[in-house]
Every structure is written in C-alpha cells, then in structure tokens.
C-alpha cells in the first residue's frame, strides 16, 4: 500500500518541485481551503438549513486536518510546503468562520479580536525565536485551545436547537469562553517559554 501511494504521487507530478506541492496530504489541505468561500454564504442565508450545511462542511474540513497529518506521518511525506500550508489552512477556516458570525450576532467581536491578536503575536514570536535559532514547539495547551475553538465554532455555526433539543448556540458560547481562556493561557505560555530559552542562551 505504501509503495502504491508513493508511485501514485510520482505519476501525479512531473518534477520534484511539483511533488512538493501536490502530494496527498497537501492536496487534502488545499481542499480544506475550499470551505472558506462557502462560509461567506452564512451572512446571506443564516437560516437553519444553511447553518447546518455550513456546520457540516466546517466539521468535515476540521476532520481532514487529522487525516492529512496522519497520512503525512505514516507514509513519511512531510514537506516544507505542508508544514506551511497546514497551520495556515486551519487558521483561515476557523478565523473566517468566526468573523462571518460576527455580523449575524452569533459570536462576540471582542473574543474574535483577542483570538486573532493572540495568533499574530505567537506567530511573530515564533518567527523571532526561529531567527535566533530557538525552537518553541506547539504545546498541549495550544492543541487543547484549537480543539475547543473547533467545537465552539461548530456549535455556533449550527446555532439552532438540534434534533436532540440541545441549544447549540448556548453550548457553543460556553465552549467558546473555555477556548478564550486556553487561548490567553497558551499565548502566555509561549512567551514564558521564549523568555526561558533566551535566558538559557545568556
């Protein structure tokens, strides 16, 4: 199976540069970005049916994040392009979903602002650390934050009562505040670990 997949990848690409982009994990990641323009429909038609359709697409996109990572590790096809595309795709999908829910009153704008600012600061910090030869790995807090954000956004996209009578919006808001706490906590953790590594260099 492993040999078959690698042979397929070679047939899909005519050069090493193309193979860097068009391998299976990267293709799955690029397909995840297709969800982004669909999220804009939420503003035009925020009814029950459209909300459920968009929520399902968002959940599928989130699941593919696990799939492309698993395939890349299992078949040893981790690439520089993949390392760049994967987190970018995740943030684009989640952030776009949150921003699209602000005008229709499903998510507080200030929470979205804090989450975006935190991500920008952490990305900047990791770039500075990398330039200084320091590696700040993703922490368990960051992964928990991402999971909570996905659950919260999924519930807020559904918004209405589910077939089980659960108030999806209320569930989403509760998990969103948990995600916010983890967002701030994990952000502070990145800065503390950066400071400790810099002190260690001195």
Image (cartoon, helix red, strand yellow):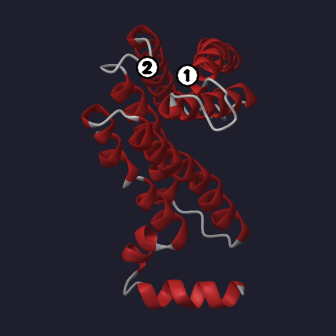
Badge 1 local density, few (<14 within 10 Å), some, or many (20+)? many
- Helix, strand or loop at label 1? It is helix
> Which image quarter holds the C terminus?
top right
Give how far across and how far down residue 84 sits, in percent.
Answer: 46, 49
Residue in the picture at 51% in, 83% down: 9
Residue in the picture at 67% in, 29% down: 165
Residue in the picture at 58% in, 28% down: 161
Q: Nearer the viewer, residue 21 or 98?
A: 98
Residue with the mark numbered 2: 106
Residue in the picture at 67% in, 27% down: 166
On the picture, is 175 further left or further right than 88? right
On the picture, is 180 further left or further right than 128? right
User: Residue 81's image quarter?
Assistant: bottom left
- Helix, strand or loop at label 2? It is loop
Q: CA separation, marks 2 and 1?
A: 8 Å
Give how far across and how far down residue 49 sits, in percent.
Answer: 43, 43
User: Residue 143's image quarter?
Assistant: top right
Q: Nearer the viewer, residue 13 or 63?
A: 63
Query: Is residue 190 at least partly visible in the picture?
Result: no
Residue with the mark numbered 1: 169
Instruction: Tell me if residue 201 comes above or below residue 71 in the rendering.
Output: above
Give how far across and how far down residue 53 sits, in percent.
Answer: 45, 48
Badge 2 local density, few (<14 within 10 Å), some, or many (20+)? some
């Amino acid at each position: 199976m492993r040999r078959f997949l690698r042979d397929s990848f070679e047939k899909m690409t005519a050069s090493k540069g193309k193979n860097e982009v068009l391998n299976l994990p990267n293709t799955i990641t690029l397909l995840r970005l297709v969800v982004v323009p669909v999220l804009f429909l939420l503003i035009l038609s925020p009814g029950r049916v459209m909300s459920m359709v968009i929520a399902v697409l968002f959940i599928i996109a989130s699941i593919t994040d696990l799939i492309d990572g698993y395939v890349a590790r299992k078949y040893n096809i981790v690439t520089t392009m993949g390392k760049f595309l994967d987190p970018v795709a995740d943030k684009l999908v989640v952030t776009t979903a949150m921003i699209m829910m602000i005008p229709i009153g499903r998510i507080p704008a200030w929470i979205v602002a804090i989450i975006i600012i935190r991500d920008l600061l952490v990305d900047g910090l990791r770039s500075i650390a990398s330039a200084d030869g320091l590696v700040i790995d993703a922490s368990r807090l960051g992964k928990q934050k991402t999971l909570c954000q996905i659950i919260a956004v999924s519930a807020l996209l559904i918004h209405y009562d589910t077939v089980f009578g659960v108030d999806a919006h209320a569930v989403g808001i509760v998990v969103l505040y948990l995600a916010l706490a983890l967002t701030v906590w994990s952000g502070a953790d990145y800065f503390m670990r950066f400071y400790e590594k810099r002190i260690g260099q001195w």
